[in-house]
Image: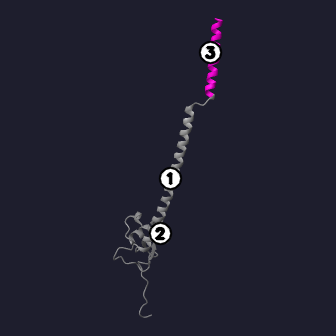
Amino acid sequence: MLRLFRLSAVLACSLVFLSRAVAQNPTPVAGSETAELLTLAKKIDEQNAKIDLLSQQILRLQRELEHSHAMSSEHAAPAALPVGSPIPANANTHVVARGETLTSIAKQHKVTIDQLQKLNHIENDRKLQIGQTLVIPGPPGSAASPSPSPSPGE
């Protein structure tokens, strides 16, 4: 029995010793994992470089598009009122700029959106275009009551 006990103690110590030795020595598998990680890191760097290049190309194309749009807006005739629409004598005009809406234009000129839509024959307020010329109605009541002409006796 004592022999069996000693033999099992020796086996247990041997197992502990072997497990520590295996844990301390890197296996060839760990080396291949390191090489694989380095390869992946290199691929990631290459992809990031491609992304940067594409981002620069996108920015350049956006600038060209904006420039060509601005040039075409300058050379194109401003979007006018429908043919045959007389511009009231007391009305001003407004050229639509980027980011403006009928609401902002109406507030700026102190008129209603409805007035702008009717006077400019706008059915869909979302179809405003940059460079479009809108007629702005004059002060309320000025169109309905024309200025009095002097009487012949005066």
Disc 3: CA contacts within 10 A as few (<14), some (14-19) or many (>=20): few
Residue 46 is situated, as x and y percent measured from the top left of the image, at 52, 49
Report if the CB atoms under discs 2 and 3 are less than 8 Å apart: no
Q: Which residue is mark 1?
A: 51
Q: Residue furthest bottom?
A: 153
The residue drawn where x is 62% and y is 19% is 15
Residue 40 is situated, as x and y percent measured from the top left of the image, at 53, 43
Q: Is residue 140 magenta?
A: no
Q: Residue furthest left?
A: 84
Amino acid type at image mark 1: Ile
Helix, strand or loop for disc 1: helix
Instruction: Tell me if residue 7 comes above or below residue 125 in the rendering.
Output: above
Distance from Cα at disc 1 to Cα at disc 2: 34 Å
Disc 2: CA contacts within 10 A as few (<14), some (14-19) or many (>=20): some
Asked if one can make out residue 114 in the rendered structure from this viewpoint, the answer is yes
The residue drawn where x is 46% and y is 73% is 94
Q: Choose between 109 and 47: the one closer to the eye.
A: 47
Q: Choose between 78 and 146: the one closer to the eye.
A: 78
For the N terminus, the quadrant is top right
Amino acid type at image mark 3: Leu
Residue 62 is situated, as x and y percent measured from the top left of the image, at 47, 62
First in residue order: circle 2 vs circle 3: 3
Q: Disc number at residue 11?
A: 3
Q: Quadrant of residue 142?
A: bottom left
Range shown magenta: 1-23
Q: Which residue is mark 2?
A: 97
Q: Quadrant of residue 34?
A: top right
Q: Is residue 13 magenta?
A: yes
Distance from Cα at disc 2 to Cα at disc 3: 88 Å
